[in-house]
Image (spheres, rainbow, N blue to C red):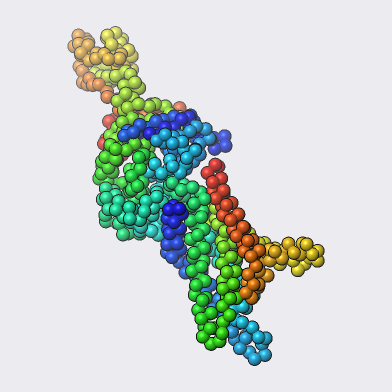
């Protein structure tokens, strides 16, 4: 449905986006993930036709964006990153305007309005002047305007920014529902959102795609080795050597420079937990902890996008809480 | 077409929501009312030459031009620059409308609001008609001139607004462009070369309005306004398009 080939955007000497190719199939939800300034918004702007690419081409539903810009724009519903609205208009008035801009008649717009307003939870502010609305409401007005004309493809740039947790859940529900019938491309820097919503993830960093796949496949291919966390009461001499000799363990790293906690890197699809336990029993160690560290998408994301200058990540991983884990 | 209408409709509403529009309307009415009153009291003097008040009203006083040079920048400065400043241009340029439609929709809104501003001056014609006789031909020609010159000035303002994201810069730029546009034709009085004089008189807006107010409708003037207006609207659309590429 949405197809971008080798999109590149340069500003003078600076390359904001380099050779990004992506496809979003019909009925698929694809998430673009990346730290701030990675080129997500630039990529999205090129796909929606706001920014002409320096190189590359975009087709939506078989129509070429360059050859038929107006036709392609009509097929896309777009929520820009900085939801810019006309502050002097009322919510319903603005939505009607947007519907008419998309080619609907006033009567058609009137018919569609109540449904859209309900699904974006805007009933309370329908008659209010946009300038007086909070950020969360504005975000929802922008979203309502994007879906009002029932486009085949939806492009949402950071759709849940500025919403409170309850609204985030409701909007995600709405997005999931929209994604059932429509093609959906969304960008976000909220990791759980991608895991919850997307069929496929594209991770972008410094203007390039660094990884792509389903959340599951990304986990498998990028965290090839499972990590075992081992804590002993007292680190006796020769622990490292003994642990290293265990079948299936490929590397042993002491944690925190101490002698009691170790991180064991395991070979692919091996589970040496039992062997570690046996080793502890045979050598008379007191085993305080033996746990498998589950890789989260966050680990992959951090691993892929951490710049050289950044501090190395502490090996002890805290599982991301459900909401608002940002990069 | 639907796109143009939607943009125009929104823009006209925006005019009526903005206090600026009311200030302009009040200012225009105040100045016009004063000029009309001055003209009438001047002509009431038995020693004054015989004349029709509405003939003097259209374009034969400096006030007419001062007001027009002020109104055009104020009405047009917001049109495109504000869209760019606030970011709403992103919605506009990703909707199924092209640059020309956006520019035309905005321009028509400005033109309609401009006509609306002149509407109350019809009362002057009514007042004159009540107390004496009005030769409606020259009055109609006068309004035609007001429309033509206004259309031209507004298109200049539109272009300035397409070039910058600051309303203030747009207004100043419009003013800076209108001053030569208005005064260029006046240079005709400085030259003796007949062909140069003729060329400049073709551009002399003051002269044009004087003729219109007398009821002389010279289609050459109308062609000039129309072609220049179309040119400036075209340039505005191109300017908007060009902004994307940087």
Q: Please indicate, yes or no, whether residue B95 appears anywhere in the rendered image.
A: yes
Residue A267 occupies which quadrant of the picture? top left
Task: Indicate the position of residue A302 as horizontal and vertical percent values.
Answer: 37, 29
Residue A317 occupies which quadrant of the picture? top left
Task: Indicate the position of residue A76 as horizontal and vertical percent values.
Answer: 39, 41
Q: Please indicate, yes or no, whether residue B67 appears anywhere in the rendered image.
A: no
Point 30% across, 51% down: residue: A112
Point 57% across, 48% down: residue: B238
Residue B121 vs A47, above or below: the answer is below
Task: Indicate the position of residue A40 as horizontal and vertical percent values.
Answer: 42, 36
Toward the viewer: A2 or A224? Answer: A2
- Is residue A225 shown left or right of residue A7? left
Residue A242 vs A109, above or below: the answer is above
Toward the viewer: A75 or A278? Answer: A75
- Is residue A286 shown left or right of residue A7? left
Residue A186 occupies which quadrant of the picture? top left
Task: Indicate the position of residue B57 as horizontal and vertical percent values.
Answer: 60, 77
Residue B95 vs B126, above or below: the answer is above
Point 52% across, 76% down: residue: B121
Point 46% across, 38% down: residue: A65
- Is residue A243 shown left or right of residue B21? left
- Is residue B237 shown left or right of residue A94? right
- Position of the N terminus of chain A by quadrant: top left
């Amino acid at each position: 449905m949405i197809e971008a080939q080798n999109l590149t955007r340069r500003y003078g000497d600076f390359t904001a986006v380099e050779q990004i190719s992506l496809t979003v199939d019909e009925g698929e939800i694809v998430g673009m993930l990346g730290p701030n300034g990675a080129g997500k918004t630039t990529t999205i702007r090129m796909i929606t036709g706001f920014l002409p690419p320096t190189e590359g081409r975009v087709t939506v539903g078989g129509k070429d964006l360059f050859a038929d810009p107006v036709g392609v724009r009509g097929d896309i519903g777009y929520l820009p990153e900085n939801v810019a609205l006309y502050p002097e208009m009322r919510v319903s008035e603005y939505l009607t305007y947007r519907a008419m801009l998309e080619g609907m008649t006033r009567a058609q717009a009137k018919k569609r309005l109540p449904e859209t307003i309900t699904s974006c939870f805007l009933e309370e502010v329908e008659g209010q002047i946009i300038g007086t609305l909070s950020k969360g409401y504005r975000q929802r007005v922008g979203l309502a305007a994007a879906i009002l004309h029932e486009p085949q493809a939806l492009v949402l740039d950071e759709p849940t920014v500025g919403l409170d947790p309850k609204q985030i859940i409701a909007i995600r529900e709405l997005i999931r529902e929209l994604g059932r019938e429509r093609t959906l491309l969304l960008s976000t820097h909220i990791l759980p959102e991608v895991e919850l919503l997307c069929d496929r993830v594209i991770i972008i960093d410094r203007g390039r795609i660094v990884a792509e796949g389903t959340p599951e496949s990304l986990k498998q291919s990028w965290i090839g080795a499972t990590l075992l966390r081992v804590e002993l009461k007292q680190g006796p001499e020769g622990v490292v050597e003994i642990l290293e000799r265990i079948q299936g363990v490929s590397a042993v790293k002491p944690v925190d420079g101490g002698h009691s906690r170790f991180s064991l890197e395991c070979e692919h699809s091996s589970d040496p937990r039992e062997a570690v336990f046996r080793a502890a029993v045979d050598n008379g160690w007191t085993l305080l902890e033996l746990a498998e560290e589950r890789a989260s998408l966050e680990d992959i994301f951090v691993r892929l996008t951490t710049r050289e200058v950044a501090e190395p990540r502490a090996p002890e991983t805290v599982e991301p809480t459900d909401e608002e884990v940002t990069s | 077409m639907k796109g143009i209408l939607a943009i125009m409709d929104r823009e006209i509403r925006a005019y009526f929501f903005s206090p600026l529009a009311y200030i302009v309307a009040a200012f225009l009415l105040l100045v016009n009312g004063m000029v009309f009153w001055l003209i009438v009291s001047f002509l009431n003097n038995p020693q004054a030459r015989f004349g029709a008040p509405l003939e003097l009203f259209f374009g034969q006083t400096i006030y007419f031009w001062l007001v027009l040079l002020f109104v055009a920048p104020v009405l047009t400065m917001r049109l495109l620059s504000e869209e760019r400043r606030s970011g709403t241009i992103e919605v506009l340029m990703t909707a199924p409308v092209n640059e020309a439609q956006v520019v035309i929709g905005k321009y028509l809104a400005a033109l309609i609001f401009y006509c609306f501003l002149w509407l109350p001056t019809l009362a002057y014609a009514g007042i004159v008609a009540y107390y004496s006789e009005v030769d409606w031909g020259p009055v109609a020609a006068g309004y035609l001139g007001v429309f033509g010159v206004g259309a031209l000035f507004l298109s200049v303002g539109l272009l300035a607004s397409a070039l910058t994201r600051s309303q203030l810069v747009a207004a100043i730029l419009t003013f800076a462009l209108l001053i030569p546009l208005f005064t260029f034709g006046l240079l005709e009085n400085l030259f003796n070369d007949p062909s140069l004089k003729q060329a400049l008189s073709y551009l002399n807006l003051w002269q044009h309005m004087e003729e219109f107010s007398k009821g002389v409708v010279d289609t050459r003037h109308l062609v000039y306004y129309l072609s220049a207006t179309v040119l400036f609207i075209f340039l505005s659309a191109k300017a908007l398009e060009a902004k994307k590429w940087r």
